[in-house]
Each structure stands twice: as structure tokens, then as C-alpha cells.
Amino acid sequence: MMTGFLNMPLTTTEQAIQLLESSRQPLIVFKKDFSGDALGAALALALVFEKRHAEPTVVCADFKLPEKYRFLPTTTRVLSQLSSAKKFTISLPLGGKQIEEFSYDVVDDELKIFITPKEGAFGEKDIIVVPPHWDYDVIITLDTPNLDSLGALYAEHRDLFYEKPIVNIDASPANEQYGQINLIDLMAASTGGVVYELLKAWGDYDLDADINTCLLTGMVEKTKGFKTGLINPQTLRNASELIEKDARRDDVIRHLYYDRDVATLKLWGGILTRLSATAGNKIISATVTLEDFKTTNTATKNLPDVIDELISTVPGVEVIVVCYEKEHNKIGVLIKSLGTFDPTRHFSTHQPQGTKLLCKFVIDGNDLALAESTIVEDVAKAIAVS
């Protein structure tokens, strides 16, 4: 139990700990277009809650596990949708009576419940109807800039997010701070780093190799193997501590970087040959043809991994634009933003899908070079204005 906070305001971290410590059925969620950072942080927190005798539920809308994250422990716990709706409860105070017989049946689409006491009888006034409710006592969002990025999970269950307190944990300046408690630490570089600092404040005596490996995964992925400008002494110190506490560093590095499939690497190599840089390398862009996908045996699903490689290749980049050829005279546009530029808002007329950090949309046409130059010019003007 936390002590020592009488007669003084609690910090954000202390508020989060107080709420999480009292939770017995936490709901842990993260954005639909998730990263290894979000997944690792969610799995780590779930494992910690279980050690503290709670029953966590982890959900990500339409969740499908990428091959590179299969090394993480307990990934099968992640649900693709909420497995249960609100509970509707009918309460019958017994008043000292003992039950002789209990049964139910469904007749003509009607549920009938039969209760026979050993003595006496129950009447209509004995029945209490408890309003429908969710079992979860707190919602924890991880690496999720806004609630809309949760996809169907939020769209179909808005009432849940209005009813339950939200602890919003992130390391991104793009986060809209929608929680009752917003634990946003830009110095942590990754959400896994924020969670690690939280757990240290909470009491990290029960962290084990599985938990630490999950947290390290986020740090490694967000910093692209400690190669980006996100690196700072705090991040390096935390990574070092996790490795000292048996985080499986070799597994993380191998699966995130060395085990990339050959097809993705071939596609990346082809893109590098026609990579363009604008605004002092703040914007890099490339085009991908249907023939590129065909000859490398890849598809649009491989492009996010390619973009990750481009981030590691070009230091100082803020926006990455990839225009790719689609059938029927359509061009797909994939935009990754590492800074303050919000492609979902700037290109809202194209109805982009995704988040501020990574979104995609489709435009008419078959001239990839023209599409690339038009999009990049538009982004460059927006960045210059901001």
C-alpha cells in the first residue's frame, strides 16, 4: 500500500498507482494499428496485474499477431474484441430461506427461471434487478494517441469509456490526453519506458524476465535499435536495468531486426534506389509499383516494416511518404509522421485511415511520380508553416 501522501497533493504517477493498485478487473487496450511498443507494454502490465492477483483483460480491435512479435510471452491473451457484453443481473435476497430446486429453460424465445424454496415462497417484490454494468473497474490505454484510434473497440463501446476511469499511458507528444489520469512522459522515448518507470514507483520487486523482455521490446523498437534521436540517458539507463534483470535482449534484437523476411528486405532495397529527400531530409519519399510487389513477392502489408527501415537509414527525418500503385488507376499513399505534422487532419478530404503517426488513403490516378511530388510539396508547405 502507498503511504506518505497525507496532506500533500499526489503526483500523476502516484494517482495512477493508487487507481491501479485497487483494480481487480483492469481492461488494457491499445490502438488498432499497434506497434511492438504497445503490445509489449500491454503484456507486461497484464503479467504484473496477475502477480497482484487481479484478472486483466487485454483487447485490440481486429488483433492479428505479426510474425516478428511471436517471441513475446502470453500473446495469445490478446483478444480481438470484447468477449462479454454488459452483465444484466437479477438478485433474489433469500432472507434465510434455503433453495430446494433451481432450473431454467428457454421457451418461445423467452427465458424462464424456476426457483423453489424449501419453505415459504418468493414474490414479485423479492426480485431486485441490477442495471446492466461492465465488470471492468479501470481502463488502461497504451501508446494510443486518441480514443478513435482504438477502432471498433471504441466505436462500438463508447459508453464503457465514459463510465470507467481511464489511465492513459504514452510517450508521444501527439497524445490528446483524454484520460482521467494522463501519464505522458516524452523523455521515456517509448510507452514501455513509461510503464517501466511506473512499475519502479509502484514497486518492481515482482518483475521477471518475461515482463522485462516485453518492456525492452518497446524501447528497442521505438528507438530503432537505439539509432534514432529519441535516445537519451533515461532510456539507456532503463534499457540497461531491464537487461540486468534478465530481459532477453538477444531475442528482441533478433526477432525485430535480424529475422526480417527476405521479401521485405528486397522491397526495401528497391525503394532505397529511388528514395528522395526534401526540406533538408525532413521529408523522405519513395514510390512502389505493382511490378515491385510482384517481383519481391510482397504486398502493401510489408510497407510499414519498410518504413521502419527507412527511419533507421535517414537520421533527422520527420515525415515519410510512400506512394504505391494500385489496380484500376488508383494510387495508395502511406504517411508516417515522427513530428508534430498530422496527416490525418491535413489530408482529411481523402478520408485517411489510421492515426497521426501512420495513416493511409487512396487517390485517383496512375502517375506515381506526379502523386509523390504533389503530396511531398503539400507536406513541405504544411511543415514550413507550422
Image (cartoon, helix red, strand yellow):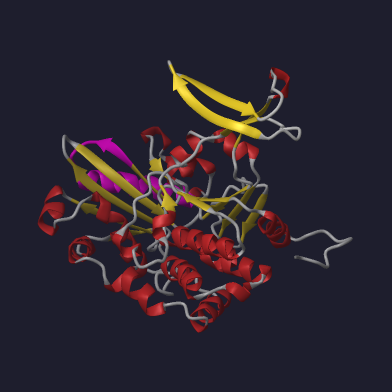
Magenta-tinted stretch: 361-384
Look at 60% across and 50% down and name the residue there: 25
Residue 1 appears at what percent x and percent y?
75, 65
* Residue 190 visible, this orientation: no
190 shown above or below 149: below
310 shown above or below 117: below
* Residue 203 visible, this orientation: yes
Residue 14 appears at what percent x and percent y?
73, 62
> Is 275 a magenta residue?
no
* Residue at the top extreme of this rendering: 108
143 shown above or below 159: below
Look at 32% across and 48% down and name the residue there: 334
* Residue at the right extreme of this rendering: 7
The answer to whether residue 376 is left or right of residue 79 is left
Task: Name the one closer to the observer, 314 or 259.
Answer: 259
* Residue at the front extreme of this rendering: 119
Kindly indicate the quadrant of the structure image that contains residue 285: bottom left
Residue 226 appears at what percent x and percent y?
43, 75
Task: Name the one closer to the observer, 99 or 359.
Answer: 99
Look at 69% across and 55% down and name the residue there: 22
Residue 199 appears at what percent x and percent y?
62, 68
The answer to whether residue 49 is left or right of residue 16 is left
Overall secondary structure of the magenta stretch? helix
Query: How many labels, in total?
Result: 0
> Is 369 a magenta residue?
yes
